[in-house]
Amino acid sequence: MTQSRSTQISLDATSFYHCYVRCVRRAFLCGDDRATGANYDHRKQWLVSRLRFLSYIYAIDICAYAVMSNHYHVVLHVDQARANKWSQDEVVERWLQLYKGNFLIDRWLKNREAFSAAELQVVSDIIEDWRQRLCCISWFMRGVNETIARMANEEENTKGRFWEGRFKSQALLDEAALLTCMAYVDLNPVRAAITDDLISSDFTSIQQRLFDYASNSTATTEAHQKLTEHLTHQQQLKSELHLDTQPAAPLMPFDGSAHTDIHSALPFTQDDYIELIDTTGRALRDDKRGALNPNTLPLITRLGIDPKHWLEHVKRFRSRYASCAGSSQAICDFAGKRAKRWGKGVGISGRVYAG
């Protein structure tokens, strides 16, 4: 049975969510169209640019993303505290970069001193509604999907659905679920055998993170040169598509310090994460089957995951859970608050999470 969005997204439970959506009939509407032979890879850049532009406007961080030929994944973090700190003027400025205004707000911007107390209260209510929308995943995803659908239909001079339906979401209830889901998303092209390595994983957050990481190094390596070629091509594509003038928010940073607020940075270090994704990707590939690097095991075990289940858990993460992912107790608590007696993934979590 379809669940209402309010039961799937609850910031009281977690501020991290995995969202994904497929093209209609799972057609390759962002890749090679097998029927016509047309190539639509440039639409992947549409998606990446739109995601990062909306992240710049909204109080929503992007932790990971992967844009495939017929679907995309994104891991989002909602920073409600950040939105609450915005002044009324900043909320209005952000909203008007995306949507039409309101005649009362337009008057208020021109001459707010002339407003009565009753009018000011109405203005305040409108702005507070906009503030809540600017930290709402449903509004964020709507802003991505509707725009891309219109652009694709205009390009093909057609009408109708572009996406299969509304986006699906999974609440990531603890740090272990967050880490596993980010790995699952970043390794999508490798797991699907579309690419051989992370460097060639175009339109993924791990490729962008590797490029940013290499750019901060003084040494120029072969891997850095290859990354530069890939990112330069994407930058040229942005320019050709007239998307290079849009501001783009950076990806949510790493930290790893126990004293850092999880709303400020991801709860693991950049070095640990990159090494974990690299070794996991190598181990998942059929032609390079191997074991995890021992240096990555402390991160997995620190978050409560049994290392011997890590590879299989990353490989099948999305299908193992429904509306939420985490430890067995976290899933039961999440289900209980929504008057459900059971949540998919409880049994799997009982085996994956170390006792």
Image (tube, helix red, strand yellow):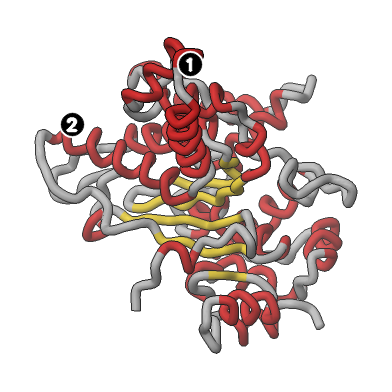
Q: In the displayed structure, does residue 236 sit left or right of residue 79?
A: left
Q: In the displayed structure, does residue 67 sit left or right of residue 252?
A: left
x, y (%) of residue 6? Answer: 46, 63
x, y (%) of residue 157? Answer: 10, 34
Secondary element at tag 1: helix
The amino acid type of the residue labelled 1 equals: Arg
Q: Quadrant of the N terminus?
A: bottom left
- 143 w.r.t. 23: above or below: above
Sequence-wise, the earlier of marks 2 and 1 is 1
| Residue sitting farthest toward the top | 110
Secondary element at tag 2: helix
The amino acid type of the residue labelled 2 equals: Glu
Q: Is residue 202 visible?
A: no
- 36 w.r.t. 180: above or below: above
* Residue in the foreground of this view, choosing between 145 and 101: 101
Q: Tell me the number on the disc at residue 155.
A: 2
Q: CA distance from mark 2 to mark 1?
A: 42 Å
Q: In the displayed structure, does residue 247 sit left or right of residue 159?
A: right
x, y (%) of residue 31? Answer: 30, 43
* Residue in the foreground of this view, choosing between 318 and 146: 146
| Residue sitting farthest toward the left | 158
Q: Write down the quadrant of residue 217 in the picture.
A: top right
Q: Is residue 98 visible?
A: yes
